[in-house]
Image: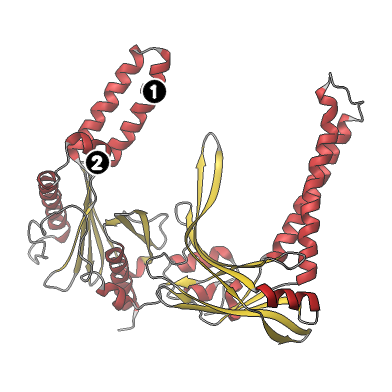
């Protein structure tokens, strides 16, 4: 399939479950990735020009007052002009480096990079090999290459606005010696490198809930003048077949605190209404698991009030070869204790001194949120031949939803906590995702996601 330039159409195609999303991005077309240096220089140049114009206009509006120690405001116009010069200096430095080294291109030998495999690429810089100083310096120290897996998170709050930050989940570095590559404009310096990609890291993903995963190659040289740096965002995906990933479902044992096997048989009964029997079975499962976990958890109620239990999950096949995934999370006793603590904090708020009342108010908010998260929730997904059936219990609310396989889109796994892996299921034409399945092991979560994808793809095949 051709690349999709429109980001909204590309986003929709991926959400609809495109089997090879890396082929849709224009930046990866032809297995050649251009460095973002040129875009950064242009963007920073525009910012510097706008910043300079704004600060000079503000300085002119103040006039040219005489500097007096008794009037700090008189220093403001000159301070504004000083601040305007700083971006200009940085822009000149970036532009000088780009003019000296030109644009760099990364030719991908493995496309896409695969989790648990190798990632190989060849760097083609704009540094002319005829420059004696550049060739001598690169030969002496080589290029420093850094390969990283990153999580970009964006959070917004009413008080401080939105903020974003990058967290490196995995990285590896190596120093490679330069090579020569012939181009129409002459010989250019480059380098070839290869990395082993670990399996236990996330793959490239779309932004979901203010979070996205991306992989990046960063190349630098410590001694070149001006300084040489280049960065490339590259595709790294789990390229195993859905059958291979689904096989991990029964290879990876359940983790967490000891809980016995499924308390009752949840096999489909053709004489029952699937929706009614599914919810009834799920209610009994949630009650049985809750009772069993109370006796199996050696911790006191006070300890469970502050540290919740890990979720419980169970995966099985019934006699119709339908995969059934059941998850239970929450703690009724801990929820009750947290609600009592929140209510006590609210009562104390009205009678305590001003300093203590503030602490009690925030304590009430924290305990109320903790009580909400401890609500007993059970979800069951049944991968039937004609569609995906989701049974869900949250408190007193009970619901059953059925989706045809043609409506199921992107299935994504996200690790919110070490023992809580969420499986998000996108439904075409519907905003958001269906209630997520929470599993205790990454392999099991990926296996469930693969099983859903496999049945969706099989249903799309012509009969």
Is 217 situated left or right of 203 in this image? right
Q: Is residue 281 above or below residue 106?
A: above
Q: Is residue 345 above or below residue 166?
A: above
Task: Answer yes or no: is residue 459 visible.
Answer: no
Secondary structure under badge 2? loop
Q: At which x and y percent is residue 75?
A: 84, 29
Is 354 situated left or right of 1 in this image? left
Task: Answer yes or no: is residue 321 visible.
Answer: yes
Q: Which mark is residue 359?
A: 1
Quadrant where the image shows the C terminus: bottom left
Q: Nearer the viewer, residue 306 or 10?
A: 306
Crowding near the residue tagged with mark 2, few <14, some 14–19, many ≥20 C-alpha atoms within 10 Å: some
Q: At which x and y percent is residue 109?
A: 54, 82
Is 137 situated left or right of 207 in this image? right
Secondary structure under badge 1? helix
Q: Nearer the viewer, residue 136 or 281?
A: 136
Crowding near the residue tagged with mark 1, few <14, some 14–19, many ≥20 C-alpha atoms within 10 Å: few
Q: Residue 341 occupies which quadrant of the picture?
A: top left
The residue wearing badge 2 is 375
Q: At which x and y percent is residue 188?
A: 73, 81
Q: Nearer the viewer, residue 265 or 416?
A: 416
Q: Nearer the viewer, residue 134 or 305?
A: 134
First of labels 1, 2 by sequence position = 1
Is 11 situated left or right of 115 in this image? right
Residue in the image at 81% along x and 51% along y: 88
Q: At which x and y percent is residue 301?
A: 18, 35
């Amino acid at each position: 399939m051709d690349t999709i330039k429109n980001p909204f159409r590309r986003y929709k195609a991926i959400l609809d479950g495109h089997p090879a999303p890396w082929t849709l991005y224009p930046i990866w077309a032809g297995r050649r990735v251009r460095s973002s240096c040129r875009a950064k220089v242009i963007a920073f140049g525009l910012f510097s020009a706008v910043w300079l114009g704004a600060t000079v206009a503000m300085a002119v509006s103040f006039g040219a007052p005489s500097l007096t120690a008794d009037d700090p405001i008189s220093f403001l116009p000159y301070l504004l002009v000083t601040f305007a010069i700083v971006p200009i200096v940085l822009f000149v430095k970036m532009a000088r480096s780009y003019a000296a080294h030109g644009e760099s291109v990364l030719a991908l030998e493995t496309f896409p990079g695969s989790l648990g495999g190798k990632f190989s690429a060849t760097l083609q810089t704009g540094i002319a090999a005829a420059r004696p100083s550049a060739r001598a310096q690169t030969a002496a120290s080589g290029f420093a290459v850094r390969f990283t897996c990153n999580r970009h998170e964006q959070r917004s709050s009413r008080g401080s606005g939105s903020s974003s930050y990058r967290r490196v989940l995995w990285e590896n570095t190596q120093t490679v010696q330069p090579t020569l590559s012939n181009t129409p404009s002459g010989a250019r310096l480059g380098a070839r490198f290869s990395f082993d990609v670990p399996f236990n890291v996330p793959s490239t993903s779309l932004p979901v809930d203010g979070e996205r995963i991306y992989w990046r190659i960063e190349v630098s040289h410590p001694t070149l003048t001006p300084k040489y740096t280049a960065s490339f965002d590259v595709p790294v995906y789990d390229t195993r077949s859905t059958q291979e990933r689904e096989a991990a479902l029964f290879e990876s044992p359940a983790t967490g605190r000891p809980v016995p096997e499924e308390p009752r048989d949840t096999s489909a009964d053709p004489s029952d209404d699937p929706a009614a029997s599914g919810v009834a079975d799920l209610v009994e499962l949630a009650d049985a698991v809750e009772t069993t976990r109370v006796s199996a958890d050696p911790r006191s109620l006070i300890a469970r009030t502050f540290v919740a239990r890990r979720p419980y999950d169970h995966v099985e096949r019934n006699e119709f070869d339908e995969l059934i995934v059941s998850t239970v999370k929450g703690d009724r006793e801990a929820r009750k204790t947290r609600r009592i603590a929140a209510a006590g904090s609210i009562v104390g708020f009205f009678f305590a001194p001003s300093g203590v009342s503030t602490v009690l108010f925030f304590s009430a908010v924290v305990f109320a949120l903790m009580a909400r998260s401890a609500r007993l929730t059970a979800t069951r997904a049944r991968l039937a031949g004609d569609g995906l059936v989701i049974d869900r219990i949250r408190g007193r609310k009970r619901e059953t939803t059925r989706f045809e396989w043609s409506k199921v889109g992107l299935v994504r796994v996200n690790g919110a906590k070490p023992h809580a892996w969420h499986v998000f299921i996108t439904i075409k034409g519907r905003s958001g995702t269906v209630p997520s399945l929470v599993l205790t092991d990454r392999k099991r979560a990926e296996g469930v996601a693969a099983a859903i994808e496999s049945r969706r793809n099989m249903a799309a095949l012509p009969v």
